[in-house]
Image: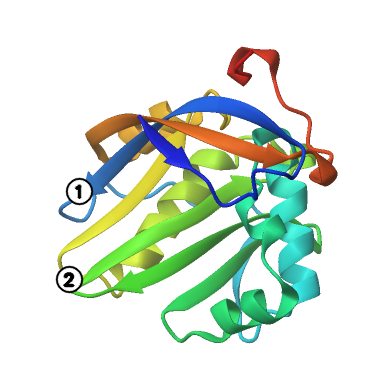
Amino acid sequence: MANLTLVPRDEPATTIAVDVTFLRMARRPDKPARPLPEGVSIQRVARCTVGFYRYLYATVGQDYVWWLRRTVSDADLAATLADPAISVHVLYQGGEPAGFFELERRPGGVVNLSYFGLMPHAIGKGLGGPFLRAAVDTAWAEATAAVTVNTCTADHERALPNYIATGFVTVQTIREVWRVPQRLGLPIPDRLKIR
């Protein structure tokens, strides 16, 4: 069991346990991608601002205990977003954001799908599969060795099945213990809490 101890011990926090599954795709998907529905597009953000990124991250991750980037300072987050190895891509439907994904190019030709998700209003509308495939295809446009991703038991219940259906293979699953700062005000499902 791995402990993620980025939160000072004296800060009020809720301790949770999640199973994190690491996945890998060693070759491009064979079957053709389903197109995005009409009126839906994906745009790479040329220079993502901290404020826009925080909006995307908070809105997509609100119900899934996405907390790590919420604790990072604006300066540190700006440095991450300015890194040429990082790119942010936004799903738009009807002119407004409906989700986003973030790619991180790693040494050895590996591209990691660091974050992926839909905004609450876009869930259940048939966007997830085509959007995930578009993210994978975007990653493979630069990957030469593999595309990786991880998900955990705090994520949407369809996350892991969708990654596998898209062609990812499970590498390993580990249990992590997180101390989620209470100041973030995130809703935490009782099933994850350690009592």
The residue carrying mark 1 is: 30
**How many labels, in total?**
2
Q: Quadrant of the rendered structure where residue 16 is?
A: top right
Q: Measuring 80% from the left and 46% from the top, which residue is drawn there?
A: 184
Percent across and percent down for residue 61 are: 68, 44
Along the line of sight, which residue is nearer the eye, 26 or 173? 173
Q: Quadrant of the rendered structure where residue 137 is?
A: bottom left
Image quarter of the N terminus: top left
The residue carrying mark 2 is: 144
Classify 10 Å Cα crowding around label 1: few (below 14), some (14-19), many (20 and above).
few
Percent across and percent down for residue 158 are: 51, 26
Query: What kind of element bears circle 1?
Result: loop
Q: Quadrant of the rendered structure where residue 103 is?
A: bottom left
Which is more N-terminal, label 2 or label 1?
Answer: 1
Q: Is residue 176 visible?
A: yes
Q: In the picture provided, is 120 more to the left or to the right than 152?
A: right
